[in-house]
Image (cartoon, rainbow, N blue to C red):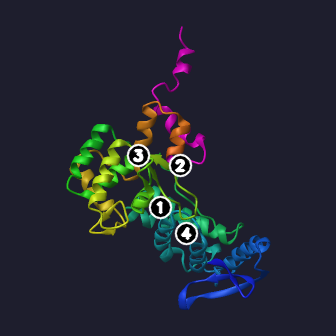
Amino acid sequence: MRIVKHRGKWAVQVGTGNDRRRFSTGFDATRENRQLAEREKDNLAQRLNAPKTNRIKDIMEAYLADTKAISKDSLQYAWNRLDPHFGGLTPEGVTRQSCRRYIKKRKNDGVVPGTINKELSTLRAGLRWHDRNTPAIVELLPAPAPRDRWLTRDEFARLLDAARGIDHLIVFLHLAIATAGRKGALLTMTWMQVRWDVKQIWLGAKPNGKKRATVPMTRTVETVLREARKTALSDHAIEYAGEPIKDIKKAFNSAVEKSGIPHCTIHDLRHTAAVWMAGEGVQMSKISQYLGHSNTSVTERIYARYQPDHLRDAADALEI
């Protein structure tokens, strides 16, 4: 959906090719009217995406079509799990009891509390998008204690050794540590984002259009990328048989198992990168920029305790 000029007016174009449709905004196609036309585009998007009925299935499908959330795929996955239980209900049917039945079923399926809460939070977000004062009551499980898993340098070396011979996983692991980038950013990264001349890597843009961090290349990751570039068959930095990789979870988990290190997830690599920086005394403001955090206070709350001199001045004040 985008703004185009059509017969002297700003119009909203939906779709492409033979499926293309245009809706006139009524505003003359002048620079001064562009902002008004953009507002009309947003209004049109809301009207086109409005749910057909008050059934939760229609509400959630409209919400997923409209949302600009970064993790849209994970929202869709959550709704796929929720749909059989809640899809045929109206918002009034979402009660503590219906949520508890859902929680019981998912627990019986072996699903962990954190995942169940993410699914129910998706339901709550969609219902509140539809009606800020929704009558639905979405009950969650008590929040589980946050994981604090990060790899030592020895553990990471063992993980690299376990990934030997799996070229795309080797590149991914080096990029994950060197950039602290999220999985989605790394798997969609193209060679155009590698700025060889200034030795920087741009992690691209989020689905909502906001730019991710640009970080310096470490000497190690530069060497790894130059070797990968020699045999590259596609525009993507991480590829397999000339094709971009949709997910690397299976290869990663196999390497973790082979390495013998205690359980860790792909996201733990980003946490590891931040902990290593904090452990070397890197300023919180710089770590925040590296991670792409919007607020340094978020970084400080999570990573300040890993700095070697954390609370040292407080302890000094207690000397007798």
Q: Quadrant of the C terminus?
A: top right
- Identify the element where label 3 is drawn: loop
Q: Which mark is residue 223?
A: none
Q: Which residue is mark 1?
A: 116
Q: Which residue is mark 4?
A: 98
State how far apart marks 4 and 1 are (Cα).
Answer: 14 Å
Q: Amino acid at mark 1?
A: Ile
What residue is shown at x 47% (from left), y 65% (from top)?
74
In-image side of 232 versus 86 (left or right):
left
Residues drawn in magenta: 291-320
Q: Quadrant of residue 93?
A: bottom right
State how far apart marks 2 and 3 are (Cα).
Answer: 16 Å
Q: Is residue 95 visible?
A: no
Count residues near mark 2 (Cα–Cα under 10 Å), then give few for <14, some for 14-19, many for 20+.
some
Between discs 4 and 2, the one toward the N terminus: 4
State how far apart marks 1 and 2 are (Cα).
Answer: 27 Å
Image coordinates of residue 222 in percent, x first then y, are 35, 48
- Identify the element where label 1 is drawn: helix
Between discs 3 and 4, the one toward the N terminus: 4
Count residues near mark 1 (Cα–Cα under 10 Å), then give few for <14, some for 14-19, many for 20+.
many
Q: Is residue 306 magenta?
A: yes
Between discs 4 and 1, the one toward the N terminus: 4
Q: Are marks 3 and 4 in contact (CB under 8 Å)?
A: no
Q: Quadrant of residue 172?
A: bottom left
Between discs 1 and 3, the one toward the N terminus: 1
| Mark 1 or 2, closer to the camera | 2
In-image side of 29 versus 100 (left or right):
right
Count residues near mark 3 (Cα–Cα under 10 Å), then give few for <14, some for 14-19, many for 20+.
many
Q: Which residue is mark 2?
A: 292
